[in-house]
Image (cartoon, rainbow, N blue to C red):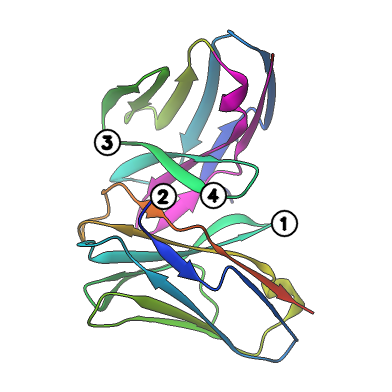
Amino acid sequence: KNEVEQSPQNLTAQEGEFITINCSYSVGISALHWLQQHPGGGIVSLFMLSSGKKKHGRLIATINIQEKHSSLHITASHPRDSAVYICAVDGNQFYFGTGTSLTVIP
Amino acid sequence: DSGVTQTPKHLITATGQRVTLRCSPRSGDLSVYWYQQSLDQGLQFLIQYYNGEERAKGNILERFSAQQFPDLHSELNLSSLELGDSALYFCASSGGGMPYNEQFFGPGTRLTVL
């Protein structure tokens, strides 16, 4: 049983394209996190959400608590955005999605 | 640089052995989290400590144990190692004990069990 489902698993985009990654979860949560993991392995927290929408630069994250769904959007994608994006939820413990591997081609 | 440090960066050992991974949180952070990332299982939550006390437990094997010391650094002990324990082990820290604080991740310790 996967408490967190992400889609798509893999995504290839041309530089400049608008990108959406989706996350659905099945447990009650306090917050949802979007993480970025680069090929070197390091993990960076992009967003922590408990409601509504947040924006950092070209990245936007939204969450719909009633529908148990979140989206991560990247506007004007760039090759440096190439990474694995992971959705994680704070329930009674932390649950992770399997990640979306994004490749942005120049 | 997240401010979270982990040592060692790499560790190679044999089956049946015991190892200790160390994590120093960001200055002022009271919560420490441990995660395991393997190729077949992805990221999994192991355990969380807040100010020295265990706060939440995930998929941590009985062969694994952790603690957080008075100076807030944490250690993850892995014993009776098996080939399947080979993975990246991440530590993260956050400012509060509540479960909804942003986490800052360390660079990870890559464990290889031969």
Vertically, is B17 above or below A97?
A: below
Residue at the image point whose x is 22% and y is 56% from the top: B95
Position of residue B98 in the picture relative to residue B64 (left or right): left
Q: Mark 1 lies on which chain?
A: B
Residue A24 image offset from top left, x and y in percent: 49, 33
Q: Mark 4 lies on which chain?
A: A
Q: Is mark 1 on a helix, strand or loop?
A: loop
User: Which mark sits nearer the N-terminus, 3 or 4?
Assistant: 4
Badge 1 and badge 3 both on one subunit = no
Q: Which class describes the residues within 10 Å of circle 4: few (<14), some (14-19), or many (20+)?
A: some
Residue B53 image position (x, y, % from top left): 25, 78
Location of mark 4 (residue): A42
Residue under disc 1 on the same chain as residue under disc 4: no
Query: Taking A7 as reference, is B80 above or below it?
Result: below
Q: Name the residue under label 2.
A: B1
What residue is rendered at 50% in x and 47% in y?
Answer: A43
Q: Residue, x 51% and y 57% (percent of image)?
A: B107
Q: In this view, does B98 lie above or below A26?
A: below
Q: Which one is in front in this view, the residue at disc 1 or the one at disc 4? A: 4
Which label was assigned to residue B40? Answer: 1
Tags 4 and 2 in contact by the CB under 8 Å rule?
A: no
Q: Which amino acid does label 4 sit on?
A: Gly
Residue B103 among magenta residues: no
| Crowd band around label 2 with a 10 angstrom C-alpha radius: few (<14), some (14–19), many (20+) | few
Which of the two marks, 1 or 2, is nearer to us in this view?
2
Q: Mark 3 points at which residue?
A: A50
Label 3 to label 4, Cα distance in Å? 24 Å
Foreground of the two, A55 or B107: B107
> Magenta residues?
A77-105
Q: Residues within 10 Å of mark 1 (few under 14, many from 20)?
A: few
Whole-angstrom CA distance, mark 1 to mark 2, is 28 Å
The CA span between labels 1 and 4 is 18 Å
